Amino acid sequence: MSKTTPTTMYTPVPDGFSVRSDAVRYTELPPPPDLAGMVHCFWELRTVTDLPQDFLYHALPDACVNLLFNRLAPTIAGVTALHTSATTLNLGTVFHCVGVQLYPGTWQGNRDELVNRYVGTPYMGALPLVDTNQRLAGLTFGAMTHHLAQLVRWCVAEGLVVPNPLTARILSRLDAISTVADMAALVGLSPRQLQRTLKRQTGFAPHDLLKVLRVQQSFRQHYLDLYADQAHYIHAFRQATGYTPVQYRKRFGG
């Protein structure tokens, strides 16, 4: 397997948590080098003790695809992705989930399998998600990553996860992209070619992908570096997250 080039300039921000305490633990671990251009991270979200109230997980659009596993119910797994709007998932008072976060454009599997909601039913598709979940039993999160990496390598061998030079180029030069025309010029395509290719490879039109990536950037950059003015920023942020920036930071501390 050839080594891929890591996408170093795009780090999706953590999603919003309604509860931040020692009772909830979120951990990310990096992928092995051979998967670094396709996998952003392996992640774990779990309760350490029972919570006194339901945990609301506010998932933000980031153009990534996740392979998700419910460790409390080994048959429950799925392939998840959001488009341009956030969604709130009620995880209850006890949960333990692990997953693989894939960079935008690397998932080339069946798009009909992608879900944008709470995954609470047994996985019935053709991917070996349930087998993988069962192999995670009794392991620490660090030890789980070996099996998660093996799953990704299986997906690579099957052509379901692939290095994507187009999106890797876009993600590595976000600082140079202000418009769809900039994006097209950066990757050496006409706007029409970019529209066709990006839609086929990611499910996103260039304009929608740019909106998602720009909101993601706004968590780490001054909004005037990304938007014409404050009004445009607030409108775009609210469309993507469901909150104004002030409301979001007050509720989730982002």
Image (cartoon, grey):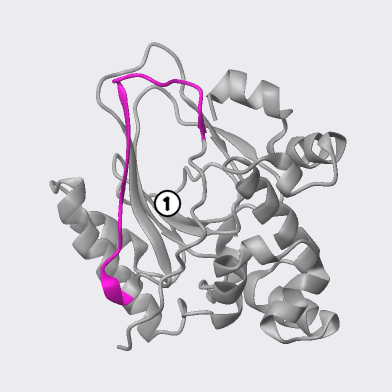
Q: Is residue 233 above or below residue 30?
A: above
- The x and y percentages for residue 225 are 72, 48
Instruction: Give the image quarter of residue 71.
Output: top left
Residue placed at 62% from the left, 71% from the top? Answer: 170
Answer left or right for 27 relative to 90: left
Residue placed at 79% from the left, 39% from the top? Answer: 233
- The x and y percentages for residue 250 are 60, 18
Instruction: Give the image quarter of residue 114.
Output: bottom right
Answer left or right for 90 relative to 73: right
Residues in magenta, as a range: 16-34
Instruction: Give the image quarter of residue 184.
Output: bottom right
Instruction: Please state which of residues 244 and 233 is positioned toward the viewer in this rendering.
Output: 233
Q: Is residue 56 above or below residue 207?
A: above
Instruction: Please state which of residues 41 and 153 is positioned toward the viewer in this rendering.
Output: 41
Answer left or right for 86 relative to 128: right
Q: Secondary structure at mark 1?
A: loop
Q: How many marks?
A: 1
Residue 96 showing in the rendered view = yes
Residue placed at 28% from the left, 62% from the top? Answer: 148
Residue found farthest to the top: 52
20 is within the stretch colored magenta: yes
Q: Is residue 194 above or below residue 43?
A: below
Q: Which part of the image, by quadrant, shows the C terminus?
A: top right
Check disc 1: other Cα within 10 Å, few if <14, some if 14-19, many if 20+. some
- The x and y percentages for residue 99 are 37, 53
> Pointer 1: what residue?
122
